[in-house]
Amino acid sequence: MSSRALRVGALSVAFIVLAALPIWVGNQYYINIASQILFWAVFALALNVLVGYGGLVSLGHAALFAMAGYTAGLMLAAGHGHFAADLTAIVVTLITSAVFAVLALRSTGIGFLMITLALGQILWGIAYRWASLTNGDNGVNVRSRPAPFGFELATADAFYYATFVVFVLAVMSMAVFVRSPFGASLRGTRDQARRMNALGYNVWLIRFLAFLLSGFWSGIAGILFVYYNQFISPQVVALQTSAEVLLMVISGGTATLLGPIAGATIVVIMKNVVSAYIERWNLVLGIIFVAIISFMPEGLVPGTVRLWRMGRQALRAKPAAKPDKLRDGRP
Amino acid sequence: MTALRVNALCKSFGGLRVTTNVNLTVEPGERRLIIGPNGAGKTTLFNLITGELRPDSGSILLFDQDITRVASRRRAHLGMARTYQIITLFGRDTILRNVTLALLGLSPLRWNPLIDLDREQHLVERARDALARVGLGHIAERPLAQTSYGERRRVEIAMALAQSPKILLLDEPFAGLSIDERRDVRQLLTAIPRDVTIVMIEHNMDVALEFAERITLLHFGEVIVEGTRSDVVNDPRTREVYLGE
């Protein structure tokens, strides 16, 4: 079987398994965990556009994620409908992303990281201290979930399916983006920005548009988050959220489609499932990350692929070695 | 009309003057060699011409169009291509993808986020043609990481040629090459048609002198000798600062 057929087969099986998850899992608690994995995966995929394909490590993406959540939450609290709230949330997140990009893209590398961190902290400060707008530490409550096309999202199953649809759209859009000329241009700016400039590319604009794309999907994930929890507080804007999603991307494997999804799965399961059994779950999470970085510095997904290939090569090499040994008269 | 005209170009890094009143006129189709000892300001001059550095004063004209304030990336669209002294390629990609990226740089397609780049046959075929031109067509699909230094030099040239430039700036294209590789690159450069003007920096005088029609000698950021091959080689100042007695 060709590797392409194998990949298509594996993806089809994964799709069917995920689409039927509420049926074979049954338990609402675990269905909710699955919903969380999916919207955190969308967020991680969004960050991966910058970190993986653009080579721009952001530590302020929680601000974009939370900006969408807060905007939607505040719009709903002000009595607006879900459609208006969500649309405004996306527009506001895109504007915020544009402001972040204009400021942060003055630099790359550690400078970019520090500017995004600072901007994220500014928004955290606003969420925390501008209590008349954001309700401060008490956060914003969302009373109901939407019912797109009459499909109520109040139950765990329904919300999971809605999240799954968004997740599939996000993965498909990323898959198309990565193979596109624009995706190739972005990767080029990551690897040789100077050369790209000399070849006629507008490096700054490519990075700016990539930031907007990343901000868009971060905002979508933020909207799913606020609907899932029906609540948002300054904790979501905090540095820890930005660091967590960055860990998802790095541990799963940057510049891959499956890596951020694998990273999101690990972190969400550790936070929600393992924490129920192990009090020091953070310690376990830390050990897992150290193990991944030590044995698979490229991330879990590319690392697993590498080990798989090495294993296959070793298996192929063995039968060829046998006749030589026999010829040499050795066992 | 001149292909390239540089007028009284000056550039300083802090207190260090790296280019002082440099004047250069290159005719269309000309093969110009720029020589000079290390630190003479040759690569800085290239960086000023291509817009990677902004001059303190002076002007640069490309086919009589003033490009002094034109962004570096726009100069590629105006027909200027370059190679680098230190090979600057996309190490994670295949040779073919490297050249495709060069073609994409001048195409409006580069902004398209929806189509599959590998299915853009006209780009891929043009990239293959460019690689065939430099003798690398048979290894187009090879990852760049698995190529030799000489092959990478040729990929650089293929990328520049793929853009169908009007003027090509080559920064030490023979550096680090074996005798056979040098011969191959020399043949390749000789085969470039006359509608492409070439300005080349090179230290390897054996191959460079054979190639050049006119030579400019830079020393401490100033043009000290300029003329035909024999003019420059026989000039005592050339022997004093560059060739040695």
Image: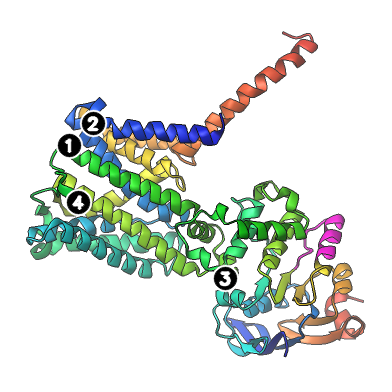
Query: Residues under labels 1 and 3: Cα distance?
Result: 50 Å
Image x and y of residue A78, in percent: 7, 62
Determine the chain carrying the residue at label 2.
A
Image x and y of residue B185, in percent: 81, 62
The answer to whether residue A114 shows anywhere in this view is: no
Question: Of residues B166 and B52, which is closer to you in this image?
Answer: B166
Q: Are marks 3 and 2 on the same chain?
A: yes
Residue wearing tag 2: A22
In the rendered structure, which disc, 2 or 4, sits on the residue that comes first in sequence?
A: 2
Amino acid carrying label 4: it is Gln
Q: Residue at x 37, y 41 (%)?
A: A261
In the rendered structure, which disc, 2 or 1, sits on the residue that comes first in sequence?
A: 2
Pair 2/4: label in front: 2
Amino acid carrying label 1: it is Ala
Q: Residue at x 86, y 60 (%)?
A: B183
Q: Residue at x 44, y 67 (%)?
A: A107
Residue wearing tag 1: A156
On residue A200, which mark appears? 3
Amino acid carrying label 2: it is Pro
In the rendered structure, which disc, 1 or 3, sits on the residue that comes first in sequence?
A: 1
Residue wearing tag 4: A235
Q: Are marks 3 and 4 on the same chain?
A: yes
Q: Verify CB contact (< 8 Å) between mark 4 and mark 1.
A: no
Identify whether A160 is placed above or below A45: above
Q: Quadrant of the C terminus of chain A?
A: top right
Q: Which residues are magenta?
A: B172-188
Q: Residue at x 62, y 24 (%)?
A: A314
Question: Of residues B110 and A37, which is closer to you in this image?
Answer: B110
